Structures are given as C-alpha cells and as structure tokens.
Amino acid sequence: MIGVNNELVDIEKRLSDLLHQCSLDSFVSVGTLKRWMKDMNDEDPMTSVKMLTGLLDNEKLVEMDIFQNLINAMIDLSHHLPSQKLNGVTFSDELKRREKQGEPSNVYITETTLPPMEWTTYYHKAMYNMSKQDFFQASKEFDRTFEKLLETKTTSQDIYRVFCNSGLSYLFSGKPLLGVQCFEAAHELNPQYAFASEQLHKYQRGDFNEIIQLGILTELNNNFKEWEKKPDYLNFDAAMKWSEKKILNKLISFDVTVDKKEFIKVAKTVNHPEALAKKLFYPQINITGEDEDFIWMAAYALWDIYCPDEPSISGFNDVLHEAFLFISKTDGKKKVKESFKETCTNYFKRLQTYIFSDKKDFLKEWQKTIEIEMDPSYELNTFLTSLLANPSLEKDVLTVVHHLNKQIPHPTWIGIEIINNIIHNNPQSNELYRELKHNHPFYCYVAHDIANYYLEKEDYLHAELYLTDALEIIDSRAKNNKLSIDTTETTIYDDYINVITLLEEIFEKSNANSKKKELLKVKKQAIEKKSDIYSKSPKLEKIDNAMNELFAKVEMDQAEKSNTIQYYDYLKKFDINFETEEPITTKEIRLNIHPKSILNVGESKGKNHSNEKFHSKIGRNDPCYCGSGKKYKKCCLERDRKENSLGRKIPVEHR
C-alpha cells in the first residue's frame, strides 16, 4: 500500500505483542506510547521508556529478554516517529540522509537506570514511619518519594496506593487539605480502589477530626520549636540586641544598603518600622522565604539605634505595656508613695509624645494594631484612670482623654471623664452616664469600671447599683444578640460572669441579705445553662471564619506547590489507565491513635501490618519491617535484592 511505513507497522506490532506479554496493554496502548513520544521525547528522549518500565511488575522485570526487547522496541518506535527537533523528520530517516550524503552522524552516549527505583527507598521509609505512628516523619518521606518520582519521571502499577497512604500521613500531620487531595487522586486513578473511597468517607463523616486537630496542634508546636532553633538573625529578640555594624553587614549580604540620613527621613513619614522596611528595604531585596523576616527585624533594630525618640506604634505599645504592668503590680498602699507618683508621671510624659504625635493617622493606625479580642484601649484606659488619683496630673489627663476621644472616638474615654466627675462629686457625671448609655446601649464596661472605683472606696451601695445596671445592659445584649461596640468584643457569657463575680464579692463584703444572694445564684445558674449560646460571639465568629479562610488559602498554596500534587499533575498528562477490572481488597494497618479507639489508617499490598517497633538496620532473622510477622529473610529480603539488582544501565542516543 502506497504511503505505508512498513518498518513502523512492524515495530508497532512487535511493541503491541510485548505490551501484552508484559501485561501492560491494560495500562497503555501503542497509540498512547506514540503520543507520549510526540509530547515528551523532545524534552527527554527517555521519559516514555522510564514511565513504561516503571509500570512493569517484579516478575516481568526478572525476565531479561522481555525487558530488553520492550526497551529496544520503544527506542525503535522513537526513531521512526517525526521529531520537532528534526523539523518533522524521523531520526531514522535523518540517519539515512546523512549516510547517503556522507555527513557525519554524531551519537552522544549517556546512561540511565531502568526502571528508576530510587523512589521506592523513600516509600519504604514512609511506610515504616507510618507503622510507628510517626506521621510527621512519614509525610517528609512521602514528600521525598514524590520528589524522586518527579525527578526520575517514572511511575508504578499501583501508584494510587502511594497516593492514598501519603494522604493518611498528611491528614494526620496537620495537612488535611493535602491529605484529602491524595485520597481523591487515588480514587480518580483507580475507582476500584475501595480503600481510598473509605478514607474519604471517614473524613467527610468526621471520624478523623480529633487526630487531625492533634496533628495541626503538633505541627504548630513543631514549627515553634523549629523557630526557636533558627539562627540569631531570624530570632527577633536576638536580632534586636545586635550592634549597628552587625545589622548593616547582614543586610549587605542580602544586597540591602542603608543610608542613615535617608532612614531617619523615611522614619519621620511612617508610623511603624515595618512600613519603613516596605518603603526603604523591600524594593532592594532579591531574597525569598524565611530570610525576608530579617529585613523587617533590622528595621525595628535600626529604628531604636538611629531615631529612638521618633514615635512609632510599636514603641507606643511597648511603653504602654510597661506602664500598665507597673500600676497592675502595685497595691493601694504603694500608690501614695512619691516614688510611685514619680514613675507614673514619667510613663505619662512618655506616652504623651505618642498620643500627641503629629504623624498622619498615628492613633488610628495604633487602634488597628491592638489584639482584636481586647478593648483596643484597655491598657491605656486603666493607666489613665489610675492617674486621676494624682491631682497634679488631673488636668493633663483630661486633655489627653479629650484628644483621644476626638481622634479615635470610643466610650471608654467618656468613662474616664465620668469617674473624674464622680471623684469631685460633680452631678454632671449622671448626665454624662445617661448620654453614654443612650449612644452606646450595649456597652457595659463603663458601668463595670465605675463599680470598681466605688468598690475600692468601699461604697458598696453605689458599686451594686452600677453593676446591676451593667447586668441589665448585658441582658439587652443577649436579647438582641448585639455586640457591645464595633471596636471591641467579648462574649456575652464572659461579660455576665465578670459582673456576677464582682457582685458576689460585693454581697460578701456588704453582708447582703440572703434573698439577694439567692437571686444572683439563680441568675448565674441560668446563664451557665445557656453558656454555649452566650459564648458565641458574632464578631469573633466572623473573625474565626476569616482566619479559617486565610489558613485554608495558605494550605491550598502549600498543597499546590507540594511535590505530591505536582507529580499528580504530571502523571495525568500520560493518560495511563490504572483502573483494575476487579475491586481492590486491602487489609489495613491498625494504629492506636486515640486512647478510646483504634483507627484504621493505612495499607500496603494486602499485608496485615501491626504497630511493632522496628530497627533501622534489619538483620536476616529480624521481624520484617513491613509488619507481616515473618522474618525478614522469608519476606521482603528477596524482593529488596531484586529491586537493588534490577537497575540496568543502557546507552541512550541524544539527537
């Protein structure tokens, strides 16, 4: 027949017969192999051969003639297919043309191992760690497994098992998204692989929730320990103690140069060292990963060295926290001492430089940096209120309070003014309090603070009145399910307990009648019964959801960059049919993960694995590392020998 390449037809028939002899025709066809060579061989001529030989089982590998014939047929097929590098001409025709025209035909010889089996070493280590319940080390070995599979460009008949077992290790080591993706990959590769479907079902049913949470917590703990082991330049406390010269030299190693005058100039225009780093340092850097952390640490340290008096939000928080701790640790008797007044005055003067800073939006940015679950001005409120006991500072304190209320309006500043009026027996305090309740009907903390003031004065009557009012405000919050105020949030339950605890203290000190105590007890019991409802905070729930979305995004990014998913994406390009004719039956490793239950968490080719202790060096008479219960010499020794001996090196022609 005109136009038929008889050589190619013969090669295809020979290859088809070999695929059948090797039981590979259920995985790939000759047509599939031709597509591989068209798509892949111009990148790496041996990719198709590596992928195909990776699919061979051990029994076929030991049949040397079949193995060699299969490789030769693949190479022959490659030579008789059009090549993009040769402008659509086959390598065989190109050799004939060169021979006819007397042109030299250079052949470059290299060596490669077929089939590539390096990945199996890491897989065995991963499964060994799985049997020891060391899921974190197992996940690292699975990472190396897929890294080696990618590097050597090969696969295996039952690669879906590798995905499923790796999924369990990822799931239990704090990477549930990656774990589920591995289960899904295993199921997609072989829908008859019931074990993968079972693990997905268990995950969706919530059977793994406790161990996943434990894995996430353990991973966080491991990361924290790793952070503690990091070098000084990645330790914030250590880096802050470095000398200027040492900091500058380290920055130079990252190609970041610092001009002191420019640094101070930029510091005057920003409110935070991190903002300075973004503006001055980050445009210069060419590093990624953890080393980037040193850049902002250096900005903090150099700020303290070059312009310590320049207001920064971090500096403000540091001074404020010191002041808060000082007055919190001082009892009432010490407050009358001159040394106490002097220290408080010094802290106040230092804080004023920040509060009255002329930097744009300084206080607004500061308000955003405070921990979300706290009143954004709690520490400052407590410190300023304590200063009201010092008459010489009263005027300045009120000036600060009015400035704060103008710049960052908040009912807590009005509360300080109310307490000051109460101190001076000014009736205006009642008017201010009524106005506050009208404008902020769900804010109970001013009433709580005023009650505390009266409690210190042992005025139990007024303390009780304001706490009773605070209870009514919280009742209103509970009824309407409202936040206390947009810029602060605690749960309704926390607010109830705080107020009731203070009322109990007052009733005890004031010898209140039993009826009052009994009513309060009933109130407390009713609240505790509804604690689950009252502990739900709409704002905090929203924050938790946002944090979960952020963590999910981070985990998604990590999963996409993982060797596991990269290998799966690579493997899909080959369209190998891994689906078996019959459902795969497996036995599972039974691991004592939870003291109350035993979860089935892995499998490996039908062997029943138990949680035994293994040694890294296994003797012939030792129990086999696979957990079969047999001695190593009667179980996996022969297989391991074959795998080690079957790496054959053959010539490869680069065209």
Image (cartoon, rainbow, N blue to C red):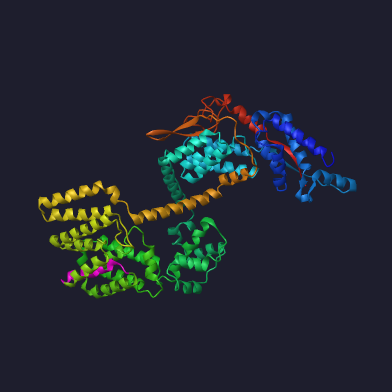
Nearest the eye: 86 or 115: 86
Quadrant of the frame with the N terminus: top right
| Residue at figure coordinates x 73%, y 30% from the top left | 66
Residue 490, percent from left and from top: 30, 56
Question: Which residue ends up furthest to the right in the rendered image?
Answer: 101
For the question of whether residue 132 can be seen, the reply is yes
Residue 357, percent from left and from top: 37, 74
For the question of whether residue 136 can be seen, the reply is no
Nearest the eye: 196 or 149: 196
Q: Is residue 430 left or right of residue 130?
A: left
Q: Report the number of numbered marks.
A: 0
Compared with 491, 591 (above or below) is: above
Residue 545, percent from left and from top: 40, 53
Q: Quadrant of residue 53?
A: top right
Q: Is residue 424 magenta?
A: yes
| Residue at figure coordinates x 43%, y 67% from the top left | 272
Q: Quadrant of residue 382?
A: bottom left
Q: Is residue 74 left or right of residue 362?
A: right
Nearest the eye: 243 or 146: 146
Nearest the eye: 275 or 393: 275
| Residue at figure coordinates x 26%, y 73% from the top left | 398
Residue 207, percent from left and from top: 42, 38
Compared with 167, 561 (above or below) is: below
Q: Is residue 364 magenta?
A: no
Magenta portion: prevailing SS class: helix
Range of residues picked out in magenta: 409-425
Q: Is residue 359 left or right of residue 179?
A: left
